[in-house]
Image (spheres, rainbow, N blue to C red):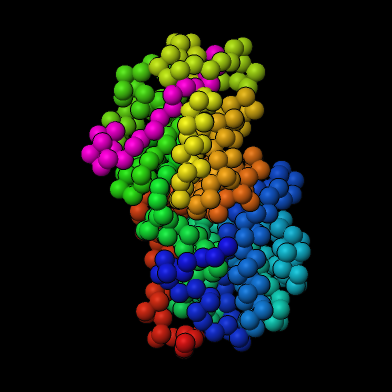
């Protein structure tokens, strides 16, 4: 896939000299483990491989990897130890991986000092120290002391101002890795210069969770398709009955504002025309049926968009030149209520334009349905992609060296 780097405003590893230098790389190895510590999904690890292998192939002297895993709340917890992923990491990088049982301290320093070229050092979970999330300066300075250059390749934590994402950049030349570059380039182009028609699909539970995205993209999109439980706030705003469907009461006023703003901006908000409803929130509910919008009975709840809605939405998606999708259309984890989300995924796969799936639930949904490889890009960051779609600055990205500033460092490669 070709990446338009014109939308990448920060320096990346491609812009610097690698040979003979020591690197500390912030990766996102926050991967799912089962109760026994077995790796369940290595997607985030495989996404980091291009950067790691690029550094090794270009002659880096040392490569130190650091990451968090889970929420250990500043205390050592074997459940969240990165030791569980060492074997898989070694298989992926195909070079020796040395695991440091802490991310700071004399033993860690000794391991890094003794590491040889073509070896990887993986530090223990950064969040075993509360200093990480506090963006503690002393902690950041220790991490920086391990290397000549800092590389941020963890888009999933780019919206966090932590020691390993922001604090460390005070002490080292700081550039983006290839994954972070890809995320920012693809999302940047879609948001700044989308090919049209530009269609946005939003789902999930609450309007309040997506109001920032809607208000930002309503200035850019041609059409916004809304499904999931958040659509019920719009139904209520327009006087439709929703039975006992999940309803974001706080989001009702937002829904009214969005409808008024869309009319003013001449942007089409498309809402479901039918729903799959059930008498209880269970896959094997007593009664499951399809009803038109506004005809959900008092004892029923909407759990998916209906087939007519799925067809209408799919037609819009397939015609689009740019599509961004964030949030499932229903309770996709249950087989009786996943068809709406499935039809959206199918339409994305048929679209000839740029198709982007935000992280979080929508990424989980498209993976669950087997369409990950059929779209242009699936973001690795849920919260980060959401904030990017809202038009917010990401602290971890803002802290990196801007292209025009990077020439002050001797690492810059003259063209």
Up the image or down, 248 lies above or below 383; here it is above
Up the image or down, 233 lies above or below 217; here it is above
Residue 128 appears left or right of 248: right
- Residue drawn at 50 percent across, 25 percent down: 308
- Residue drawn at 51 percent across, 42 percent down: 318
Question: Residue 78, image x and y in percent?
Answer: 68, 52
Does the rendering let one see residue 88?
Answer: yes
Q: Is residue 5 magenta?
A: no
Does the rendering let one see residue 243?
Answer: no
Q: Is residue 275 magenta?
A: yes
Up the image or down, 236 lies above or below 185; here it is above
Residue 162 appears left or right of 368: left
Q: Nearer the viewer, residue 204 or 197?
A: 197
In the picture, residue 238 is in which quadrant? top left
Question: Residue 110, image x and y in percent?
Answer: 66, 78
In the picture, residue 265 is in which quadrant? top left
Residue 367 appears left or right of 237: right
- Residue drawn at 59 percent across, 40 percent down: 346
- Residue drawn at 42 percent across, 60 percent down: 189
Question: Residue 342, image x and y in percent?
Answer: 59, 35
Residues drawn in magenta: 259-279
């Amino acid at each position: 896939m070709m990446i338009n780097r014109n939308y990448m405003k920060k320096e990346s590893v491609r812009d610097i000299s690698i040979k003979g230098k020591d690197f500390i790389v912030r990766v996102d190895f926050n991967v799912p483990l089962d109760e026994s510590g077995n790796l369940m999904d290595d997607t985030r690890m495989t996404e980091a491989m291009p950067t790691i292998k690029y550094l090794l192939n270009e002659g880096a002297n040392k490569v130190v990897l650091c990451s968090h895993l889970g929420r250990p709340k500043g205390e050592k917890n074997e459940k969240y130890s990165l030791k569980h992923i060492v074997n898989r990491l070694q298989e992926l990088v195909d070079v020796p991986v040395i695991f440091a049982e802490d991310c700071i301290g004399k033993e860690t320093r000794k391991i890094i000092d003794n590491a040889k070229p073509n070896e990887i050092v993986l530090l223990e979970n950064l969040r075993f120290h509360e200093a990480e999330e506090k963006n503690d300066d002393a902690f950041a300075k220790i991490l920086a002391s391990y290397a000549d250059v800092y590389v941020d390749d963890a888009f999933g934590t780019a919206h966090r101002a932590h020691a390993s994402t922001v604090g460390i950049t005070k002490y080292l030349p700081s550039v983006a890795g290839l994954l972070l570059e890809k995320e920012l380039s693809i999302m940047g182009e879609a948001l700044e210069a989308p090919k049209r028609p530009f269609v946005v699909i939003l789902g999930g539970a609450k309007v309040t969770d997506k109001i920032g995205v809607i208000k930002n993209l309503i200035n850019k999109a041609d059409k916004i398709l809304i499904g999931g439980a958040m659509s019920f706030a719009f139904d209520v705003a327009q006087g439709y009955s929703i039975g006992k469907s999940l309803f974001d009461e706080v989001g009702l006023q937002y829904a009214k504002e969005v409808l008024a703003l869309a009319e003013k901006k001449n942007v089409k908000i498309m809402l479901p025309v039918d729903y799959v409803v059930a008498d209880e929130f269970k896959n094997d509910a007593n009664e499951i049926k399809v009803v038109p919008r506004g005809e959900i009975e008092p004892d029923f709840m909407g759990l998916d968009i209906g087939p007519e809605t799925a067809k209408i939405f799919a037609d819009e998606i397939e015609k689009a030149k740019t599509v961004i999708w964030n949030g499932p259309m229903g309770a996709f984890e249950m087989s009786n209520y996943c068809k709406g989300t499935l039809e959206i995924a199918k339409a994305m796969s048929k679209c000839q334009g740029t198709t982007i799936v935000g992280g979080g639930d929508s990424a989980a949904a498209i993976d669950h349905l087997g369409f990950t490889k059929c779209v242009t890009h699936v973001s690795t960051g849920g919260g980060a992609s959401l904030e990017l779609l809202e038009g917010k600055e990401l602290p971890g990205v803002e802290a990196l060296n801007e292209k025009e500033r990077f020439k002050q460092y001797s690492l810059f490669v003259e063209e």
